[in-house]
């Protein structure tokens, strides 16, 4: 039997297995190392079919999600997550400094630590709140250094990227612009998916579960909306319309560290 006939026979017998194209492999949260990982004892555990963060951790699922820098849409069967040996330890988890001296003269100051994949909102140097992020994916890097917020747009949309498998522009709700490069490309802090690893095209992504419900039809009860929280903190509330709002003296943004890469 020649090679062509053998190949045809294999395809006929195993149509869903033979010669299939391998799916794109993404790292799991267990394969991403952060400087703060040793502060919490944890084990790596793969989620099983039918399991969810809510079912496993009850009311503390939010803390586990934040520790893994992942959203519920991506915390699905087969994904390996970091499971704290004592979930209550996450109540003291602080990957950013509680006081940041460089911000002590600023009413509002945003610190983004790429090595931790976390953002902190500071008021006169004191940490007001912190939230996980998704930064540049390794091909499209997030710029580092000191910037200042220059515009806000509640319903911004990407002019370059689409919702996967659709023709719809990717929504960038609660967007805060912090940088425009020489080519005129703008970089924003905005709502997006958080898959548990650096995945953006250079912007800083924050939780926006309402967007996920609208775009993907999942998450019956959206709860996490860090993008809106930061947006309202910067503006002092929600604007009455959807126009782009200039911020001539917006808060400083300091981006430090180096984004972690998969340990595959």
Image: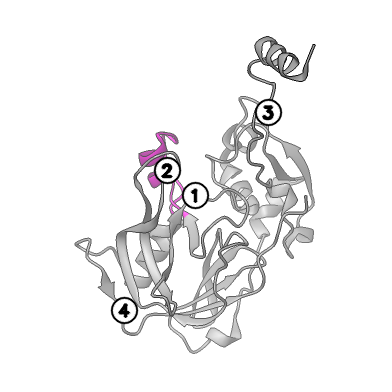
Q: CA distance from mark 4 to mark 2?
A: 28 Å
Crowding near pointer 3: few (<14 within 10 Å), some, many (20+)? few
Q: Earlier in the sequence, mark 1 or mark 3?
A: 3
Q: Quadrant of the N terminus?
A: top right
Crowding near pointer 4: few (<14 within 10 Å), some, many (20+)? some
For label 3, the residue is 48
Secondary-structure class at tag 1: loop
Residue at x 43% of width, y 56% of height: 191
Secondary-structure class at tag 3: loop
For label 4, the residue is 247
Foreground of the two, 67 or 20: 20
Q: Where's residue 90, x and y in %?
A: 67, 53
Q: Earlier in the sequence, mark 3 or mark 2?
A: 3
Q: CA distance from mark 4 to mark 1?
A: 26 Å
| Residue range of the region highlighted in magenta in the rendering | 207-225
The answer to whether the residue labelled 1 contacts the one labelled 2, judged by CB atoms less than 8 Å apart, is: yes
Q: CA distance from mark 1 to mark 3?
A: 21 Å
The answer to whether the residue labelled 4 contacts the one labelled 1, judged by CB atoms less than 8 Å apart, is: no
What is the residue that sits farthest to the front in this orientation?
2
Q: Where's residue 250, x and y in %?
A: 37, 80
For label 1, the residue is 193
Secondary-structure class at tag 4: loop
Vertical position of residue 113 compared to residue 228: above or below: below
Q: CA distance from mark 1 to mark 2?
A: 7 Å
Specify whether residue 257 is painted magenta. Answer: no
For label 2, the residue is 212
Crowding near pointer 2: few (<14 within 10 Å), some, many (20+)? many
Residue at x 62% of width, y 50% of height: 196
Foreground of the two, 208 or 232: 208
The answer to whether the residue labelled 4 contacts the one labelled 3, judged by CB atoms less than 8 Å apart, is: no
Residue at x 72% of width, y 61% of height: 34
């Amino acid at each position: 039997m020649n090679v062509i006939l053998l190949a045809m026979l294999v395809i006929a017998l195993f149509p869903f297995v033979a010669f299939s194209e391998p799916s794109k492999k993404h790292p799991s949260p267990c394969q991403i190392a952060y400087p703060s990982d040793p502060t919490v004892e944890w084990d790596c555990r793969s989620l099983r079919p039918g399991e969810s963060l809510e079912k496993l951790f009850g009311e503390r699922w939010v803390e586990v999600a934040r520790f893994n820098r992942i959203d519920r849409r991506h915390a699905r069967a087969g994904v390996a997550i970091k499971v704290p040996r004592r979930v209550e330890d996450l109540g003291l988890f602080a990957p950013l400094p509680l006081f940041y001296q460089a911000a002590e003269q600023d009413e509002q100051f945003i610190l983004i630590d790429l090595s931790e994949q976390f953002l902190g909102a500071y008021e006169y140097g004191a940490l007001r709140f912190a939230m996980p992020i998704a930064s540049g994916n390794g091909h499209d890097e997030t710029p580092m250094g000191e910037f200042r917020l220059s515009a806000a747009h509640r319903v911004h949309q990407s002019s370059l990227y689409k919702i996967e498998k659709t023709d719809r522009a990717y929504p960038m709700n609660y967007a805060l612009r912090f940088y425009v490069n020489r080519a005129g490309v703008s970089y924003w802090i905005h709502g997006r998916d958080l898959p548990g690893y650096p995945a953006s095209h250079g912007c800083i992504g924050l939780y926006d579960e309402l967007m996920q419900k609208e775009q993907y039809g999942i998450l019956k009860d959206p709860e996490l909306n860090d993008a809106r929280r930061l947006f309202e903190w910067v503006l002092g509330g929600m604007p009455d319309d959807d126009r782009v709002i200039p911020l001539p003296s917006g808060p400083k943004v300091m981006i430090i560290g180096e984004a972690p890469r998969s340990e595959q």
